[in-house]
Image (cartoon, rainbow, N blue to C red):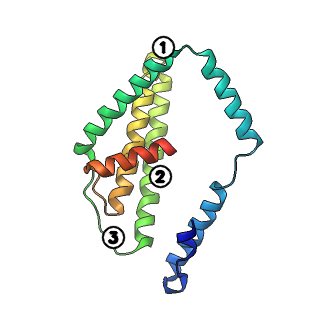
Amino acid sequence: MRELARIDIKSMDPYQRYAYKDMMQWIRKYDRSPGILSSITSSIQKRLNRIIPGKVHTAITVAVREVIKTLMLGTRFLSPKPKHLPHLKYIEDAIHTSITTHKRTAAAEGGLTGAGGFLWSIADFPLLLGIKIKLMQDIAALHGKDGRDTREKFFLLLVLQAA
């Protein structure tokens, strides 16, 4: 955060200044300590975790790990080539378009799996995870990063975990 505060915004063009101020506002918003509602939610989650047997936790962890491995192996076929757009404004416009498209895809996927009943709902988690990973790869490509690179995949997993 301190490094960001030292950036000279006078050397930026107007859109970069806008984006910088927007980013700093976002950082301040999410840098605050958790509120009372977050503490209550966390307490409830901890109680539920103590009730659920360890074998169930282990089974879910293994299943999620395998789903993520499969998705990450498949991304080499779905990763777009890195793009080199000339300005941050164009990059962010393309990102907003991609987010809108992926939101619509996720809504359709959720509606279809929900309409299919319990058995189809089992497919909901891996499909939604795949949509999220694909969106992050699209965003990375718009920033000029290659989503097929192992380091980039690892970074995307860290972002997904943080979210």
Q: Which residue is mark 2?
A: 100
Q: Earlier in the sequence, mark 1 or mark 3?
A: 1
Residue that appears at 46% across and 39% down? 106
Q: Which residue is mark 1?
A: 55
Distance from Cα at disc 1 to Cα at disc 2:
39 Å
Q: Residues within 10 Å of mark 1 (few under 14, many from 20)?
A: few
Q: Quadrant of residue 37?
A: top right
Q: Which residue is more in the foreground, 145 or 124?
A: 145
Q: Quadrant of residue 42?
A: top right
Question: Does 116 appear above or below 133?
Answer: above
Q: Which residue is mark 3?
A: 85
Q: Earlier in the sequence, mark 1 or mark 2?
A: 1
Please state the horizontal and vertical placement of residue 96, each as a whole percent of the image: 47, 59
Q: Label 3: state its secondary structure.
A: loop
Quarter the N terminus occupies: bottom right
Q: Which is more foreground, mark 1 or mark 2? A: 1
Residue that appears at 40% across and 66% down? 91
Q: Label 1: state its secondary structure.
A: helix
Residue 7 is tagged as none
Which residue sits furthest right? 36
Distance from Cα at disc 3 to Cα at disc 2:
19 Å
* Amino acid bearing label 1: Lys
Are the residues flagged by discs 3 and 2 in contact, CB closer than 8 Å?
no
Q: Which is more foreground, mark 3 or mark 2? A: 3
Please state the horizontal and vertical placement of residue 26, each as a whole percent of the image: 61, 61
* Amino acid bearing label 3: Leu
Please state the horizontal and vertical placement of residue 136, each as a whole percent of the image: 40, 50
Q: Residues within 10 Å of mark 2 (few under 14, many from 20)?
A: few
Q: Label 2: state its secondary structure.
A: helix
* Amino acid bearing label 2: Thr
Question: Does 130 appear above or below 143?
Answer: above
